[in-house]
Amino acid sequence: MEEYIVNFRKIERFSDGRVTMQPIYTKHLDDKETELLKRNLNKVGYKYIGRSKDRYDNYYTTYERKSIEQSTDSCEVIFKVTIMRLI
């Protein structure tokens, strides 16, 4: 049985070029919980961005959703979910 670490973040991109990132929370999930999470992310508006590799050769999957309610003309708010498998 595989285990995963799931990171939820809030990213704010301002019109003057600044970017802030705030961690919301991190969870440790197993296989079944991760598959359920992936299915539910697509249902609530998250889009699959792709798979990437970090500097330690760990692969992770990224999902993003732009918040229309919190975004303004001067600030774009994006919620980002990163799912990384533990080896």
Image (cartoon, helix red, strand yellow):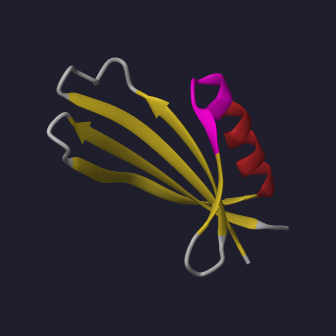
Foreground pick, 26 / 68: 68
- Residue 69 percent coordinates (x, y): 32, 18
How many numbered badges does the structure rendering display? 0
Q: Where on the picture, by quarter, is residue 14?
A: top left
**Residue at 38% in and 25% down:** 67
Q: Is residue 20 left or right of residue 8?
A: left
Q: Nearer the viewer, residue 26 or 21?
A: 21
Direction bottom: furthest residue: 56
Direction from residue 17 to residue 25 in the image, left or right: right
- Figure quadrant of the N terminus: bottom right
Residue occupying the far left of the picture: 16
In the depicted structure, whether residue 55 falls above or below residue 51: below
Q: Is residue 56 left or right of residue 1?
A: left
Q: What residue span does the magenta drawing correspond to?
A: 41-49
Quarter where residue 4 is shown: bottom right
Task: List x then y, in percent, for residue 58.
Answer: 65, 73
The residue at the point 72 percent across, 67 percent down is: 3
Of 81 and 48, the residue lying toward us: 48
The x, y position of residue 85, in whole percent, is 70, 66
Work out which quarter of the rendered image holds the C terminus and state it.
bottom right
Q: Is residue 83 above or below residue 56?
A: above
In the picture, measured across the screen, residue 77 lies left or right of residue 62, that is left
Residue 23 belongs to magenta span: no
The residue sitting at 72% across, 50% down in the picture is 34
